[in-house]
Image (spheres, helix red, strand yellow):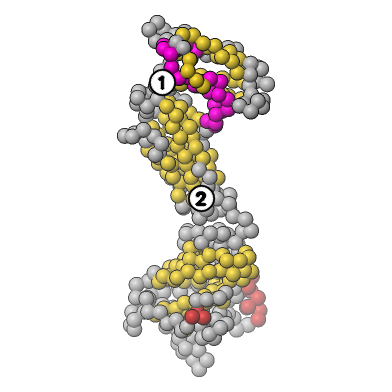
Amino acid sequence: MLKVSASPRVAVAAFVVTTIALLAVSAQAQYMYLDSNGNGVHDVGDRLRVCPTRIDVWLNTANNRDGSPASCAFGTGGLDLAHYEFVFQAVGGTVTWGPMSNLIEGFARILARDARDTTGTVFYHNGAIRAGAALPPGLYKVATLTVTVATGSPRIDIISRHPNNGTGRTSFGSECPATALYDHTNRHGQTWTDVDGLSQALATDAPPRVTLPGVLIPQDGSTVTFGVTAIDLDADPIVLLTADLSALPLGNDAVFDVTGLGTTIANGTFTWTPTTSDSGDYAVSVTATNCLISLALPTIIHVIGTVSSVETPPIGTPNFLAPNEPNPFSPETSIDYSLSRESEVRVRIYSASGRVVRTLVDGRMPAGPHLTSWNGTDDAGRSVASGVYWCRLESGSFRMSRRMILLR
């Protein structure tokens, strides 16, 4: 990481300056660096991941890492770009190297020598532009490749020379004058040393964490809206935040809008206006992806009929679920309901997350009023925790739910 100097004292000063520059803003320029989080600079988020990692190779021929103008090690001349070579090495583990893609038009002429250039712990790649078409000094994303961790927890270093073929070197062509020792090429380890590779992979890498409501119970005709947040605690960029809307009724107008992709925090907003014929239970599952996929977490939407302000069954409409009494309750509450005709009936208790806790009634029942109760236990007979629960009546196409509060 040290700039070449003719004096030991100057060299020490350069080392101090470089060390300070490493702690400075990540947007400072550098000769060559690897970027794995897609933000175009080298920062603390640039590391290998447990899943295949896309690596962008950046080369700045105009500036050093600390932002100072780059110049020839001796003489004068511009640091244009006519060809490049680079050698990467996995340290602390092994990797599988994917194919390399040149990103600069005209650099597709590859000078690879043999199979040792792309196998083992070292990766070698180079390219050259046609004669007379050198690029001016500047910052270039020259290539990209994908690396997969095979064993251990490796990092990727940019090294000076390929240890196997002996000819591959990290270097680039420039207009610097030639001497008896050097031609016009800037070589890592000789005429320049500002490079940054990738930090080692985390011992454990985790997918993003998604938060969203567990259950929503709108009235028919009311718009359903809820927010979703995806956070990656490992500082990996979130690539996708998606909602599975396939369980919603056909012809629905549901929309899931997403912001913040490419950062460590992404947000989504779900909006849907059910129709009067959409009574039922609908699950909307959301997943977030960096290179790992989060658990698919659902929001259960219970779409119910419009509840009358009168809390007794209106004449001519005897299908009805009354509020439980007492409410809040402990340890037991009574649940009254009525049916317009004999039918298959199901009365269930749901948790706030939409999970079925207890089935109180499941069978054919005659028309008329009925009474059941719940003692705050699940289907296995275990006491459930204090909190908000929902009682739901289903009879034919009729659906109705009531909010209940259990206080231990």
Q: Which residue is mark 2?
A: 293
Q: In what element is the residue under mark 1?
A: loop
Q: Considering only vertical position in the picture, is 93 above or below 184?
A: above
Q: CA distance from mark 2 to mark 1?
A: 39 Å
Q: Earlier in the sequence, mark 2 or mark 1?
A: 2
Q: Considering only vertical position in the picture, is 408 above or below 236?
A: above
Quadrant (top left/top right/bottom left/bottom right) for the N terminus: bottom right
Q: Nearer the viewer, residue 204 or 188?
A: 204
Q: Which residues are magenta?
A: 337-361
Q: Nearer the viewer, residue 134 or 92?
A: 92
Q: Magenta span: helix, strand or loop, mainly?
A: strand
Residue 403 screen position, x and y as percent = 53, 20
Asked if residue 48 is among those painted magenta in the image, a careful observer would answer no
Q: Nearer the viewer, residue 235 or 351?
A: 351
Q: Going by the image, does 318 lie left or right of 199?
A: left
Quadrant (top left/top right/bottom left/bottom right) for the C terminus: top right
Label 2 vs label 1, nearer the camera = 1
Which residue is drawn at the image coordinates 54% and 11% (left, top)?
371
Q: Going by the image, does 301 lie left or right of 89?
A: left
Q: Nearer the viewer, residue 405 or 59?
A: 405
Asked if residue 354 is among those painted magenta in the image, a careful observer would answer yes
- Looking at the rendered structure, which numbered label has been put on residue 396? 1
User: Quarter-wise, where is residue 339 in the image?
Assistant: top left
Q: Amino acid at mark 2?
A: Ile
Which residue is drawn at the image coordinates 60% and 84% (left, top)?
6
Q: Going by the image, does 353 lie left or right of 251?
A: right
Q: Residue furthest top?
A: 315
Which residue is drawn at the image coordinates 49% and 37% (left, top)?
298
